[in-house]
Image (spheres, rainbow, N blue to C red):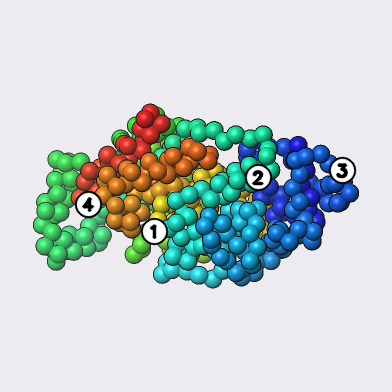
């Protein structure tokens, strides 16, 4: 058993060493007395900030303080101290996101992250943990294991044309006329007359995936219509029936609307509406536009009754926003405590590949395979995001179902 000397056992210390050692089956214990530490047999780790100048004070602090950060090679210096344990906590807790940086949507921007393009595609927290274990000469051998594939789907727009009535339908037709998109007018008529399937109606594909992959999740936008929230209302009975039908084979979670950002009453209203349709409690959530801020959004989701969150990833770049693909408890830096609110990071999103990174189908497959190998080597789940409108080989997404299918077959390669 590994003996770790600490000045005191803090919530941050317990949280971080649990990730490093417990998640890898390594037994350890803390001691706070130097005499007891010296008497202990090997292996040992001196993590006393008062006795070891290479130990950062970060895990002994209780507040949130702007840190001086420097990257060199594959190492991170925090206030000029190279400390793998502190580095893991800094990234895993998303410490940098508590500093007031935000993009036009109020999100923490990838461009401000210490991870950068050179680190974000690496599971840095897992890599640092393995490096530390090796340095301590512990009896631990990382094994390459095929990770569980966890497909997830966001339903931002249930249908392109169906169930849209009154003013919304007339506005869409008028817009198509103004932009000379007469093919859309013709397509809309064919769909509404039942001569053609709605191009966003890919729910048969999603159901089939859900039957093959039991961990599949669907997150449904049920918020009121607004500029950034354009789905069909949940007061439409046929829409309700579809949601209930999909829930028979797949776990349905809430996709809190863009308008719900920092508005607990709106989150609760949307959750109650979905709970009513599903006749049960909705426990899983993923933010529309991945729009969340720490700690406010997570605190509100907890208050609303959610247990699991699936937004941990960047819209702008694929990879590991929290430095790992492993699900983990959220550490609330504001209250300085570990919570039982579970974070499930995702590795890539469809729109990130095509819209942000400008990759084509073949380049996307190559990138996904690289990410898969990282997860297979360092552990975790291979969770990824698609949308119902991007998997039907329709419009700008023509040919992209092949990328999803490639992902679903990774464990068979």
Q: Is residue 51 left or right of residue 236?
A: right
Alpha-carbon span between mark 4 and mark 2: 49 Å
Marks 2/1: CA distance?
Answer: 35 Å
CA gap, disc 1 and disc 4: 19 Å
The quadrant of the image that shows the N terminus is top right
Q: Which residue is mark 1?
A: 316
The residue that disc 4 covers is 396
Q: Are the residues flagged by discs 2 and 1 in contact, CB closer than 8 Å? A: no
Tell me residue 207's x, y (percent): 36, 34
Compared across the picture, whether 368 is left or right of 341 comes to: left
Residue 87: horizontal and vertical position, in percent?
61, 56
Q: Callout 4: helix, strand or loop?
A: helix
Q: Residues within 10 Å of mark 1 (few under 14, many from 20)?
A: some
Mark 2 sits on what residue? Answer: 135
The mark nearer the N terminus, 2 or 1, is 2
Q: Nearer the viewer, mark 3 or mark 1?
A: 3
Q: Residue at x 62, y 64 (%)?
A: 78
Please tell me whether mark 4 or mark 2 is closer to you in this view: 2
Can you tell which mark lies on residue 283? Answer: none
Label 1 sits on a secondary structure element that is: loop
Q: CA distance from mark 3 to mark 1?
A: 51 Å
Q: Residue at x 36, y 62 (%)?
A: 228
384 shown above or below 139: below
- Residue position marked by numbered label 3 in the rendering: 39
Q: Quadrant of the C terminus?
A: top left
Q: Which callout, 2 or 3, points at the residue further toward the start of the chain?
A: 3
Q: Front-most of 234 and 121?
A: 121
Instruction: Classify residue 259 by image quadrant.
Output: bottom left
Which comes before the other along the chain, label 3 or label 1? 3
Q: Are dots 1 and 4 in contact, CB under 8 Å?
A: no
Q: Residue at x 36, y 59 (%)?
A: 229
């Amino acid at each position: 058993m590994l003996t770790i000397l600490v000045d005191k056992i803090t919530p941050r210390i317990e949280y971080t060493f649990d990730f490093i050692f417990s998640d890898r089956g390594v037994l350890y214990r803390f001691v706070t007395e130097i005499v007891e530490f010296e008497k202990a047999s090997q292996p040992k780790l001196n993590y006393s900030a008062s006795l070891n100048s290479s130990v950062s004070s970060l895990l002994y602090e209780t507040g949130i303080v702007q840190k001086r950060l420097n990257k060199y090679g594959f190492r991170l210096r925090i206030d000029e101290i190279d400390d793998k344990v502190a580095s893991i906590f800094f990234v895993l807790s998303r410490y940098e996101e508590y500093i007031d940086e935000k993009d036009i949507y109020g999100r923490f921007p990838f461009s401000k992250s210490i991870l950068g393009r050179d680190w974000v595609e690496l599971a840095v927290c897992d890599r640092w943990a393995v490096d530390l274990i090796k340095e301590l000469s512990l009896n631990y051998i990382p094994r390459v294991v095929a990770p569980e594939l966890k497909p997830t789907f966001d339903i931002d727009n249930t249908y392109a044309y169906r169930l849209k009535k009154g003013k919304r339908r007339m506005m869409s037709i008028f817009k198509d006329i103004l932009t000379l998109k007469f093919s859309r007018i013709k397509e809309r008529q064919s769909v509404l007359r039942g001569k053609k399937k709605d191009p966003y109606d890919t729910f048969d594909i999603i159901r089939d995936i859900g039957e093959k992959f039991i961990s599949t999740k669907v997150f449904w936008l049920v918020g009121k219509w607004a500029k950034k929230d354009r789905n069909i209302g949940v007061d439409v009975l046929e829409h309700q029936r579809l949601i209930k039908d999909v829930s028979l084979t797949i776990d349905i979670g809430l996709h809190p609307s863009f308008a719900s950002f920092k508005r607990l009453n709106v989150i609760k209203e949307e959750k109650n509406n979905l709970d009513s349709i599903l006749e049960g409690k909705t426990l899983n959530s993923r933010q529309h536009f991945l729009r969340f801020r720490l700690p406010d959004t997570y605190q509100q989701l907890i208050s609303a009754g959610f247990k699991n969150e699936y937004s941990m990833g960047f819209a702008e770049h694929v990879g590991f926003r929290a430095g790992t693909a492993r699900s983990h408890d959220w550490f609330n830096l504001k209250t300085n405590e570990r919570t039982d609110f579970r974070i499930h990071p995702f590795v890539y999103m469809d729109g990130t590949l095509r819209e942000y990174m400008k990759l084509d189908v073949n380049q996307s497959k190559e990138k996904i395979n690289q990410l898969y190998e990282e997860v297979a080597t360092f552990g975790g789940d291979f969770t990824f995001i698609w949308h119902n409108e991007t998997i039907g080989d329709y419009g700008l997404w023509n040919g992209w179902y092949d990328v999803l299918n490639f992902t679903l077959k990774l464990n068979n390669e």
